[in-house]
Amino acid sequence: MLTVAVISPERVLFEGQAPSVVAPAHDGEVGILPQHAPMMALLGTGELRLGSGERFRVRGGFLQVADDQVRVVTEWSEPA
Amino acid sequence: MAKGRELKGRIKSTENTKKITRTLEMVATSKMKRAQDRVAAARPYARALAEVMANLHAPELAEQFPLLRQPATVRSAAVILLTANRGLCGAFNSNLIREGRQLLQRLESGGAQVELHAVGRKGIGYFRYLGRPMAVQRADLTDKPSAADAASLIDDVMARFGSGALDAVYIVYSRFNSVMSTPPTSERVLPVAVPARTGAARDFILSPGAEQILTELLPLAVRNAMYRALIETAAGFQSAQRTAMKNATDNANEMLTTLRRTYNRGRQAQITQEIAEIVGGAAALSG
């Protein structure tokens, strides 16, 4: 399982476990599963999907993966 | 009993004032609670940004980023002074204005051209009274400033710093340490001060490269500094208002006690006197 946090400037939108994450990176979607190598990617605009079913619309910001911790730090986001 | 009627009037008016201050106190208390929650909710974002920037930043990159440019001499600067739109909050606004004036003086005595961006009706009113020109006057921000409000304040300034038209940008705001401590603070937001890295650097896969990521993230950090200043000032205002209104209510209570005591004493003295007169009169008749 991955520990996921979705953070916007105003609040933390989601914090919890998910089996996978699909995020809209600047150059196309990236999928993240457990045991992913440490990564940092810029985000574009699109839909962030968690394997547990949550969906968020996000714009800008970045994504960081390390030790099965995924942090999605967005400039703007809201639940879709 | 003219004195008594006058006292009664004063008691009534003090009671009415107390009702108002008590209500304002309760309103401020509940607004403060929510403003405090917003300050707390904004922390994870700021922490995540700072951490990532510290990880990516290398001193040799500083030259390439306009937002990290460290001018040798500050020739032109901008000061963004945050105040509240309303009063009834003790010395909150005047403390911020004093801090702002000191900063302006310090920068100007260093030979810089300083432009003033006044946010909040109280600051605007003060500097209009002084006759100091303001580059920007904003009184349209509410008790609940949003990240979009912050961007609308800082984006233009950030672009001008990037192009070299400004050498430094400061925000004067009220830092929200706790309900009891909200000191006025000047913070330099541009050039961006990248926090020092803590712990060992990790090998991240970077997509795209470190430079592009930093180019994207630096403006986010500046906007976030502005946003934090806005929400902390909003929370500070509510807690200052609550304190001021609580003091006013306490004073009203104290005043009411004294007034009621004086009134009752007068009333009793009058009754005693009347009885004495009646008894005296009756004794004179029967005697």
Image (cartoon, coloured by chain):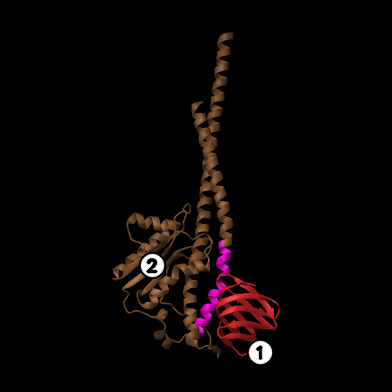
Chain colours: A red, B brown
Residue at 57% x, 65% y is B38
Residue at 66% x, 81% y is A3
| Proximity of marks 1 and 2: CB atoms separated by less than 8 Å | no
User: Which secondary structure dominates the residues rendered in magenta?
Assistant: helix
Q: Can residue B103 be seen in this view?
A: no
Inspect the image, locate mark 1, and give the three-letter code of the amino acid beneath it.
Gln
Q: In this view, does B275 lie above or below B149?
A: above
Name the residue that disc number 2 marks.
Answer: B79
Indicate the quadrant where residue B101 lies. Answer: bottom left
Along the line of sight, which residue is nearer the eye, B285 or A75? A75
Per the rendered image, the range of residues in magenta is B35-55
Along the line of sight, which residue is nearer the eye, B178 or B93? B93
Q: In this view, does B47 lie above or below B185?
A: below
Name the residue that disc number 1 marks.
Answer: A35
Inspect the image, locate mark 2, and give the three-letter code of the amino acid beneath it.
Val
Residue at 50% x, 36% y is B10
* Label 1 crowd (10 A; few <14 / some 14-19 / many >=20): few
Q: Judging from the image, what secondary structure is the residue with disc 2 in?
A: strand
Residue at 54% x, 76% y is B47
Q: Which mark is residue B94?
A: none
Q: Judging from the image, what secondary structure is the residue with disc 1 in?
A: loop
Q: Is residue B203 left or right of residue B191?
A: right
Along the line of sight, which residue is nearer the eye, B25 or B246? B25
